[in-house]
Amino acid sequence: MNKTNGLVWFKNDLRLLDNEVLCKAIASCDAILPVYIFDERQFKKLHLGLPKADFNRFEYLVQTLAVLRSNLKELGSNLLIKIGKPEDIIPQLISNYHIESVFAEQEYAPEELTIASRVAKNVQVPCNYIWGKTLYHIDDIPYDIEAVPLTSKAFRTNTTKKATVRNLFDIPDHIKTLDLDNWGKLPNSEDFNLNRGSAKELFMPAGEDEALKRLAYYTKESELLTSYKWTRNKSLGMDYSSKLSPYLAVGALSPRTIYFSVKKYEEHIKKNISTWWLLFEVIWRDFFTFKGMRMGSSIFKTAGFKNKDLDFENDSNIFKKWCAGKTGIPFIDAHMRQLNETGFMSNRGRVNCASYLIHDLKVDWTWGASYFESKLIDYDVTSNWMNWHMQAYETWYTNPVNQSIKYDATDFLKKWIPELREVKGELIHIPWKIKSTKIEYIKPIEVYDKWSRAENKILKLVNGK
Ligand SMILES: Cc1cc2nc3c(=O)[nH]c(=O)nc-3n(C[C@H](O)[C@H](O)[C@H](O)COP(=O)(O)OP(=O)(O)OC[C@H]3O[C@@H](n4cnc5c(N)ncnc54)[C@H](O)[C@@H]3O)c2cc1C
C-alpha cells in the first residue's frame, strides 16, 4: 500500500494498547487523523422515551475519550472530536484532509453494520474494517458465523481446543499525525439534552489508564482473582468480581490483555478454578458476540430467535416502578437504584431484575433490555440483548426473595434502600412482614405464592428456629 494520509475512526476501541486498527493505520500511512464522532442518534429518545445512551453512559464515554486524547497527545498525536453522522462526517474529512484510506474496528451488530456500510458507500477510498472485539479472532474460531453452536459449552470446548489467542499489539512509540488548528471540544450532556435524573457518581473511573490499574489490582496486587469463583455472585462493593466490563465495553481494555494477565497470574501466583472461571466468562462474551451475529436482528425482537410467545401484560406503570427501583421488593429495588445512580449492576442483580420483570411483572423483556441499554456504562449489544433473551426464554425462573437471603444481601440492601436501614435481622428481605408502622418503604406490587418457601425460611431464621 502507498504511504498516505489515513483516518482512524475510533469507536468501541478507545485504547492504545492492543489496538490493531491504530497499529495497522500507522504502519500503512505517512500520517494519520484520529477521530471520534458523537453520533446524535445514540442520544435521541426512542419509543419508550429512553435515549439509547443516557447521562451515565454519556459521561463515562466523555471521560474515556478525555483520557484517550491525552494519551494520544503524549505520542505526538491528538483526537479530533466531531458531532454528527459518521456517514456524513467521514466523507467531509476525507475531502478536507486528503485522506486516502479509512481504518476502523469491524462491527458485528445490525445498526452499527449499516452505518459502517453507509460510510464505505459514501467515500471513494478504501475502508479497512478490522476485527477487534473478542478474545478469539473471528477468523480463528472453528466455525462460520451461520454455524456457531447454540450452546456455550460446545462453542468454548471446540474454540479453546482449536484456536489460539493472538498476541497483543504494543502501544505505538510515536504517532505521526496530521496538523490541525482545531481538534474540537468534548461535548457535554446538555448538547444532547440528557438529564442527570437520579444519576450520581459513576461506578468506575473511566479510561485506559484506570482499566489497566483495575486489571493489575484485581490480579497481582490484591490476588482477589484467586477467590473469584466463590465471590462473583455477590453485589456489594468493588472486590467480588473483576469490574472490567465497563472498560471492555468502550474498548479501553482488550479481552486479550485480560487473557495474558490471567495467564501470567496462573504462572507466577496461582492457577485454580477461579482463574479458569474468569476466562470462561470472557469466552462467554465471545460466544454471545458470535451467536448474536448468527441470530441477527431477531435478538432485539419480543419473540426472539426462538420465535417464542410469552403472555406479556405490559403495564407501563408497573414498568416505571421497576425502572425507578420502587417495586417494594428490596433485592430488586436496591439493584435498580444502584443502576440508576452509578450505571452499574452486578451480574446477580441483572439476572434477578430481568427474571422478575419478565416472569413476575409480565413486562416485555425488550423493554427491560432497552432500559439497561440506556443506563449501563458497560452496555454491550450482544452481552445485553443475549443475556436478556436468555432470561426470557432459555433459563429458569429466579426467585428474588430466595436469592436475597442466599447471597446474604443485607448490607447491600441497607446501602441502597435508606428506608430499610433501621430494620434489624433477616426481615429486611421481606419487609412486608414487618409489623412496625415506622418503616416507610413501599408496599410490594405483589407477593407471589411461589415465594412462600423462601419467606418461611426467613421467618424461621427470624424466630430463631
Ligand atoms: C440481563 C443481563 C444484561 C447484561 N448486560 C450486559 C452488558 O450490557 N454488558 C456486559 O458487559 N455484560 C452484561 N451482562 C453480563 C454480566 O452481568 C456483566 O458482564 C458482569 O456483571 C460485569 O461485571 P464484571 O466485569 O465484574 O464481571 P466478571 O464476573 O468479573 O466477568 C469478567 C468479564 O466476563 C464477561 N462476562 C461475565 N459474565 C458475562 C455474561 N453473562 N455475558 C457476557 N459476558 C459476561 C464480562 O466481559 C466481564 O467483564 C448482562 C447480564 C444480564 C443477566
Image (tube, grey):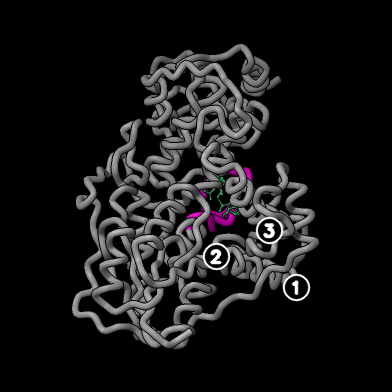
Residue under numbered circle 1: 267
Q: Earlier in the sequence, mark 1 or mark 3?
A: 1
Q: Nearer the viewer, mark 2 or mark 1?
A: 2
Q: Is mark 1 within 8 Å of ligand 1?
A: no
Q: Decide if residue 263 is on the left or right side of residue 40.
A: right
| Amino acid type for the residue under numbered disc 1 | Glu
- Which range of residues does the magenta coloring cover? 232-246
For the C terminus, the image quarter is top right
Where residue 267 appears, x then y in whole percent?
75, 73
Label 2, label 3: how many angstroms apart (C-alpha)?
17 Å
Where residue 42 appears, x then y in whole percent?
34, 48
Assign a secondary structure to mark 1.
helix
Residue that appears at 27% across and 78% down: 97
Label 2, label 1: how many angstroms apart (C-alpha)?
26 Å
Residue under numbered circle 2: 132
Q: Nearer the viewer, residue 238 or 178?
A: 178
- Is 241 included in the stretch rendered in magenta? yes
Q: Which mark is residue 279?
A: 3
- What is the chief secondary structure element of the magenta stretch? loop
Where residue 234 appears, x then y in whole percent?
60, 43
| Amino acid type for the residue under numbered disc 3 | Leu
**Residue 42 versus residue 82 in the image, above or below:** above
User: Picture quarter containing residue 255?
Assistant: bottom right
How many neighbours does mark 1 have within 10 angstroms: few (below 14), some (14-19), or many (20 or more)? few
